[in-house]
Amino acid sequence: MATHAPPDESTMPARSGFALRPSPVSGELPGQRDPGLPSAVGVVGLGLVGSALAGRLANQGIPVIGFDLRPEARARLATDPRITVVDALADLASRVSTALLAVFDTDDVLQVLAADEGLLVAGSRIDAVIDCSTGDPARLAALAADLVDRGIDFIEAPLSGSSLQIAAGEATMLLGGRHEAIARQQAMLDVLCLRRIHVGEAGFGARAKLATNLVLGLNRAVLAEGMVFAQTLGIAPQVFLDLVLATPARSAAAETKGAMMVSGRFDNPQSRIHQHLKDVRLMLAQASASGQSLPLSASHATLMDAAVQAGDGDLDNAGLIRQWRRLAAPSPVQPASPANRTGTQDPGSPT
């Protein structure tokens, strides 16, 4: 186990399978602490996403108990006096009834919940699990059914948005689970993310995240490819980005990743290449099981795999432009310098 303002949606008609909540302007919640909030929340996985979520909880005065397998992640969060970091999952499970998971994949979710050494050990107080990872839909649906039989609520809550957007409350949460379970956690979900879409039962949160991430990831990859193509035509990267932002080619990917691609600096990642590669492999597996071909995503996976093999897996997803430059250049791009990369895998990265 290794441990991401639209129009007023409150006035929009409800759509089948969807429940929308309006987004705050500032990302911070006004007013007094909601009496429906839990007395404390456990956060498992203290990477980019877990740290952002822990910060939002702490900002609202909710005690946070954090855990991560990696000592460096525990040490980083331990400097925040509002967060208590523990060295064992059993310790966390004895202190809270609600656990928020921000781990790498479904294997990690299952290991976190293991009865022998995880959150469900004897004496555990856990009665609600909120999983913010991007995982395997079928396995998560099976897990939810098992937990419900044991009297434990399970809510899928993957987030669409960078870690900065999550920290600011500007991401979108894709919910999968029973209506009554979600209603019981509404006050805390409001703290985490007001912009939420309830897609369906457990398993549908992951399906929704994979489908939307397919579009998001290809937008980033195409922006990087276009920038390198423009440069071979003699158009400077900044000029190309200005063109994209001023034309119908504009996208959220250009707005959030374009400047990083122009600067060539990826030392402050908001999401990571290796994390998105995991997601694209899940997309390909899901599509294959349904008899669908995803040729663009297959090419995207090949591109990211080459980037990871070249040592760029821990870079921000904007760093995929380095792989496009390798393909365009007569000589290989130099390995990322220490200033441009992080040396540790962060399982809690959004995509």
Image: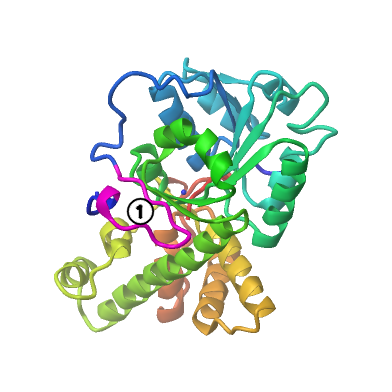
Q: Amino acid at mark 1?
A: Arg
Vertical comparison of 83 with 171: above or below: above
Q: Residue at x 42, y 52 (%)?
A: 19
Q: Position of residue 203 (x, y in %)?
A: 62, 57
Q: Residue furthest top?
A: 81
Image quadrant in which you'd find residue 343: top right
Does residue 210 appear in this view? Answer: yes
Q: Residue furthest right?
A: 116
Q: Position of residue 344 (x, y in %)?
A: 58, 44
Q: Residue at x 68, y 34 (%)?
A: 69
The foreground one among 349 and 35 is 35
Q: Position of residue 163 (x, y in %)?
A: 42, 44
Vertical comparison of 294 with 179: above or below: below
Range of magenta residues: 10-23
Q: Position of residue 243 (x, y in %)?
A: 16, 72
Label 1, on which residue?
265
Main secondary-structure element of the magenta-colored stretch:
loop
Query: Does the segment drawn in magenta span residue 120?
Result: no
Query: Does the segment drawn in magenta span residue 11?
Result: yes
Q: Would residue 11 be found to the left or right of residue 215 on screen?
A: left
Vertical comparison of 147 with 68: above or below: below
Local SS, label 1: loop
Q: Residue at x 24, y 75 (%)?
A: 249
Q: Residue at x 39, y 23 (%)?
A: 60
**Colouring used for the render:** rainbow
